[in-house]
């Protein structure tokens, strides 16, 4: 069952942001991610479906804040 809110959020999915998000998710924390380019967020979430904590993509800043 998915959590209602993530443990942490991260804005920016350049090289450092992607690695940081994966490290956090690999340690069992659910993380919400946002990037101003929606396609980059969608691609990142699709490429990482099986992390222990889980990665939640947000398409808008409002959605990100609520996650």
Image (cartoon, rainbow, N blue to C red):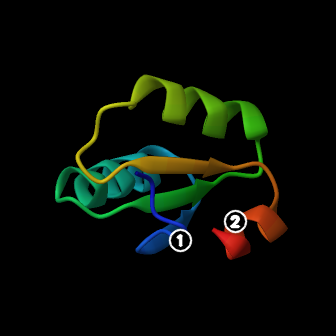
Q: In this rendering, which labeled residue sits more in front, label 2 or label 1?
A: 1
Q: Which residue is mark 1?
A: 5
Based on the displayed image, in which of its 4 quarters is residue 66 positioned?
Answer: bottom right
Using a 10 Å C-alpha cutoff, classify the residue at mark 1 as few (fewer than 14 neighbours), some (14 to 19) or many (20 or more). Answer: some
11 is higher (above) or lower (below) than 34: below
35 or 8: nearer the eye?
8
* Quadrant of the image containing the C terminus: bottom right
Q: Is residue 39 left or right of residue 56?
A: right
> At 38% from the left edge and 31% from the top edge, which residue is drawn?
48
35 is higher (above) or lower (below) than 48: below
Q: Which residue is mark 2?
A: 64
**Callout 1 secondary element:** loop
Q: Earlier in the sequence, mark 2 or mark 1?
A: 1
> At 40% from the left edge and 51% from the top edge, which residue is drawn?
1
13 or 5: nearer the eye?
5
Q: Is residue 36 left or right of residue 12?
A: right
> At 21% from the left edge and 59% from the top edge, which residue is drawn?
28
Q: Is residue 3 left or right of residue 36?
A: left
Q: Residue furthest left?
A: 27
Label 2, label 1: how many angstroms apart (C-alpha)? 10 Å
Looking at the rendered structure, the number of numbered marks drawn on it comes to 2
Q: Position of residue 41 (x, y in %)?
A: 63, 40
> At 53% from the left edge and 60% from the top edge, which residue is drawn?
32
């Amino acid at each position: 069952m998915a959590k209602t809110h993530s443990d942490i959020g991260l804005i920016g999915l350049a090289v450092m942001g992607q690695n940081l998000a994966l490290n956090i998710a690999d340690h069992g924390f659910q993380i919400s991610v946002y990037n101003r380019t929606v396609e980059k967020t969608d691609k990142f979430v699709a490429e990482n479906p099986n992390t222990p904590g889980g990665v939640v993509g947000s398409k808008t800043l409002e959605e990100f804040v609520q996650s």
